[in-house]
Amino acid sequence: MSQSDKRILLAEGLAAGDDDGALHSRLVAAGISAAAAKYEVDRLAKDPMAAMLRKQAARMAKQRWLLANHERLAREAEGGFALDTLEGVDPDHFYRHHYEANRPAKLVGLIDHWPALARWSLDHFAGVVGDAAVEAQVERERSPDYELAKDDHRRLVRFADLIDWLRKDEASNDIYLTAYNSGTNAAALAPLWDDMAPIALLEPRTRDGFFWLGPKGTLTPWHHDLTNNLLVQVIGRKHVRMAPPWAFDRMKNSRHCFSDWANEALPAGPGDSDTPPILETIIGPGEAIFLPVGWWHQVEALDLSASMSFTSFRRSNAHVEDYASYGAID
């Protein structure tokens, strides 16, 4: 085994928090003699990089302990680890017990006053903005990393053509008009914003939302957002699965804000040492889900689906300025 390979084994062990005995065993298990392994481990006592790795491993162990306490508190709460459903939402209660507490909630009755609930349909879209050119995510099924490679899937299409395709009512994850396309689509879809009205939990603006439209079968893979989000369902149903930030070690986060669980439908429940605890719900027309910053989630359309998402809360929602871990982090 080369010296470089030995150093890699030692670095992996130090990052994992191995003491000298565990480091020695790690090297011997890789085929290094006991005497050579002792020599390599003894050398670490004078290596400042090894000292820093050990210090960082101790810090990470402390963070894991703190997150484990968050998990214990969540499980010991009245009702256990569960998703709250709020009806007739009081903004003060929402901000105190959910927004500021970083706690998700399903919201019912939030947009009962929206004309969109009665108006929105494929026929309405075609009649109001059918001639517009819109941007959508297309050919998603040819790439397992379609979310990471969103720019590669952007295409301009005639909205009426997209609507005609959706009328087939075929399950597909191949085409989806998403929030990522909203910058291009804001002007084209502006007439649809007249079908909305202010939401009590948000700043009194409606034209800063993000429009989502796709067939049943669209999947947004496991990820966390860099803002607090409110996802509002207008047409169809979506299945939303969520995992808490304190389950970070079980979320297989190796790149940016995405999980290597990808599109796996992790089952609801407490999880175990390998899988995260999962909350899940289905939101239908007129219902919404509050997705706090840092909460992992996966969203699957069960029907032809039209949704809006908003980030314009009455509190600061700027969390990206000090976020730097866009690259590989595993």
Image (tube, grey):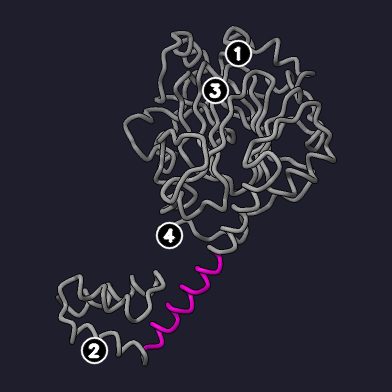
Are the residues flagged by discs 1 and 2 in contact, CB closer than 8 Å? no
Question: Of marks 3 and 4, which one's residue comes earlier in the chain?
Answer: 3
Asked whether residue 278 is drawn in magenta, I would say: no
Based on the displayed image, in which of its 4 quarters is residue 131 positioned?
Answer: top right
Badge 1 density bin: few <14, some 14–19, many ≥20, Cα 10 Å? some
* Residue wearing tag 2: 39
* Residue wearing tag 3: 213
Q: Amino acid at mark 4?
A: Ile
Are the residues flagged by discs 3 and 1 in contact, CB closer than 8 Å? yes
Q: Which mark is residue 86?
A: none
Q: Is residue 149 above or below residue 163?
A: below
Nearer the viewer's eye, disc 3 or disc 2? Answer: 2
**Residue 225 seen from this side:** no
Q: Nearer the viewer, residue 203 or 73?
A: 73
* Residue wearing tag 4: 329
Q: Amino acid at mark 3?
A: Leu
- Mark 2 element type: helix
At horizontal 51% and vertical 23% (from top left) the residue drawn is: 301
Q: Which residues are magenta?
A: 47-63
Question: Of marks 3 and 1, which one's residue comes earlier in the chain?
Answer: 1
* Residue wearing tag 1: 125
